[in-house]
Amino acid sequence: MDLRKVHFLVIEDSHPTVLLVRSVLGAWGAAVVHEASTVERALDMLTTTRPDLAILDQRLGLDDGLSLLRFIRHEGADPYLPVIVLSADGRPVKVAEARDAGANAFLVKPFTARGLYDKLQSAILRPRPFVRSKEYFGPDRRRRDDLEYAGPERRTGGA
């Protein structure tokens, strides 16, 4: 996977985590890695830098990173922006919250370089189609086709 032309925005308030992400991305050839440590700065960077992918901390100090993700999905300049959510809390309820906010992927801190690479590969090379409903807009949350379901919202192909 060639990351030389991918523009990243790392939205994270922990400087050591930013340095780690920046270092790992740089080792893989990423040349453009912007960073924001607050929601306000992230909002500015989203419009001025137009990233190809964002890596977002679920908690930004006292702010909620998922509120920023919901803003990106519903009001942002690029609602289709791939977003990988980082969190120190890997409980299923936290994963579900990120998924329901529109995350493309979820990665638990501390993470491995391989774990980050896998999430990047998924978001860049195997993106999920986006779904819009009354309650949700974001990547398709379904991981497999439910062959038992025959209702009006049945998908017509494999997932």
Image: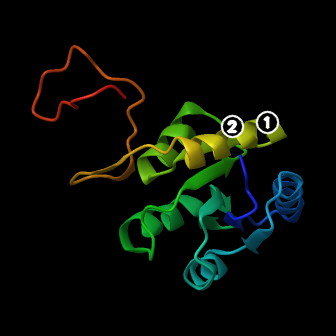
Residue, far top: 148
**Crowding near the residue tagged with mark 1, few <14, some 14–19, many ≥20 C-alpha atoms within 10 Å:** few
Identify the residue at horizontal 21%, vertical 30% (top origin): 156
Q: Amino acid at mark 1?
A: Arg
Q: Is residue 150 above or below residue 70?
A: above
Alpha-carbon span between mark 2 and mark 1 = 6 Å
SS of the residue under disc 2? helix
Left or right of residue 147, residue 101 in this image = right
SS of the residue under disc 1? helix
Q: Amino acid at mark 2?
A: Asp
Residue 49: name its quadrant: bottom right
Dot 1 corresponds to which residue?
Answer: 114
Residue 6: in sight, yes or no? yes
In this picture the colour scheme is: rainbow
Q: Nearer the viewer, residue 119 or 75?
A: 119
Left or right of residue 22, residue 59 in this image = left
Asked whether disc 2 touches disc 1, contact meaning CB atoms under 8 Å apart, the reply is: yes
